Image (spheres, grey):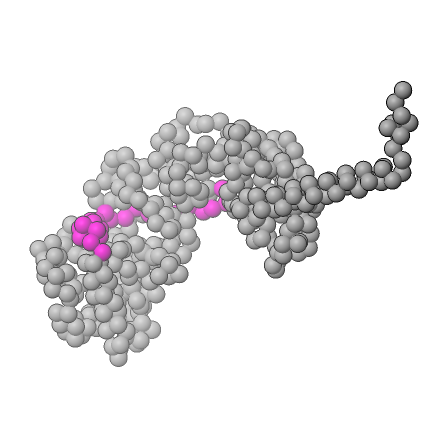
Amino acid sequence: MQPYQDIFPNKTTLLHMRFADLYIQSKLFCKMADVNQNDIDPMLYNFIAAKTPGKITPEVFKSFIMANKTSLNNFRYADWNEINGRLVGLDIDDSRKRYIISTSSTPPKDSYVKQSFVLKGVPPIPTLYGFIYEVQNTLEFPKELGHYLFLMPALSKMFGKDSYLSDFREPEKMNDFIRFVQEGKGKLDSIRRSFQHEPRPLGGGSDGFAYAIGKTRIFKIFQQQFSYDAARDAANKIWKQHGAAGTEAYIEDLGKIGNFGKHPVYYYIQERMETVFNFFNEDRRLMDQLKGFIKDIINNVQQDSNYESIRRNKNHPRIGNAIKSLTERVYNKMGYTINEELNSKLEGKLKPDWILKLIEEVIAKLITDRTDLRPYNTGITSNGYLRFFDPAFDPKEL
């Protein structure tokens, strides 16, 4: 028969066993906490930090991890990306599964929510809300959509990832694209009538994306209101009414197509030209020389004693004569300060009076407060002049 003590340990033995068990459990608990804290996805940590007013101490963050360990465990297989102030994730094993964490308790639109979580805040970390869901494609793919698939690279670059193929596998993004086409179809059909051939991508910058649509035209879509306002001002060509300038790229048509999600999408159709950068075979040294020359023009214009008066009276019916006089003064003052190598490179490609026209255009842009005077925004027209082809860019990028 088994001894009594072997079946029921005495109090001392039992106490030792409990302490040993608690010690092991506490060590394991601390180890798990450290692993969870150190191994948490950097995107998730950065998102939490961005939503937290003030600094997160290690102690506070550890408390947040421990308070929400079970919920956070459900998001360990997410590939995260921050979109519109929310953390959105794809499951690395299941392409149908989606995750989202945000400060809003409202579930994502057009979705089937499978699980929801509250990530309890530990001050100063706020309370966050998480969802595991499947996106439902609520719109039918219209047959005529094929005519507008060329817009996918542009919209993806403007509002998502660089790779439009992966970006538009997202049903929510495809829903936005379908709505954009359906709601803007009348305008898009009107734009397509200007195409001389199927659009060919020319590339994009910080604000938009351009396509070649013929030998003499380009089509650009963009998202910034200030760019639209500048393009509209350029199309109106206020200074042309006074007989001034006339060297800026001609904008044939512009407007708003519609909204991609919550974002407005504008466009213009503009005169096409050969970019100077391409003409220089992407030689940045020559571009720096052109930049220096344009900067000298700007300085000489702004130092002229009549410049401020011209700027204040830019809408005067006879201001064109004053602009032409200022152009000639700046040209005579600068002489032939253009770099010899740069001048020889452009010789034969441009008309003899191209510098005069360039100075005139710089003046026109300065007095109308448009700051698009970068050499990378210049092109060579078919009739032999150097023109600025971007109506505006964000001055913060200088």
Residue 145's x, y, as percent? 40, 30
Direction from residue 97 to residue 128 in the image, left or right: right
353 vs 105, left or right, is left
Q: Residue at x 63, y 32 (%)?
A: 113
- Residue 281 on the magenta span: yes
Residue 181 in the magenta stretch? The answer is no
Q: Is residue 7 visible?
A: yes
Residue at the image position 18 percent from the left and 50 percent from the top: 281
Q: Position of residue 292 (x, y in %)?
A: 23, 65
Q: Is residue 185 visible?
A: no
For this orientation, the residue located farthest to the right is 4
Q: Which residue is drawn at 26% across and 55% down?
A: 376
Classify the position of the C terminus by image quarter: bottom left
Q: Is residue 142 above or below residue 361?
A: above
Horizontal side, residue 16 vs residue 140: left or right: right
Q: Position of residue 56 (x, y in %)?
A: 62, 56
The residue under the point 68% across, 50% down is 63
Q: In this view, does 228 lie above or below 1?
A: below
Range of the magenta residues? 261-284
Quarter holding the N terminus is top right
Residue nearest the viewer, comparing 83 with 187: 83
Front-lying residue, 372 or 121: 121
Task: Say left or right for 220 vs 248.
Answer: right
Q: Is residue 394 above or below residue 133?
A: below
| Residue 309 x %, y % | 30, 76
| Nearer the observer, 25 or 126 | 25
Q: Is 233 in front, or is 90?
A: 90
Q: In which quarter of the image is residue 89?
A: top right
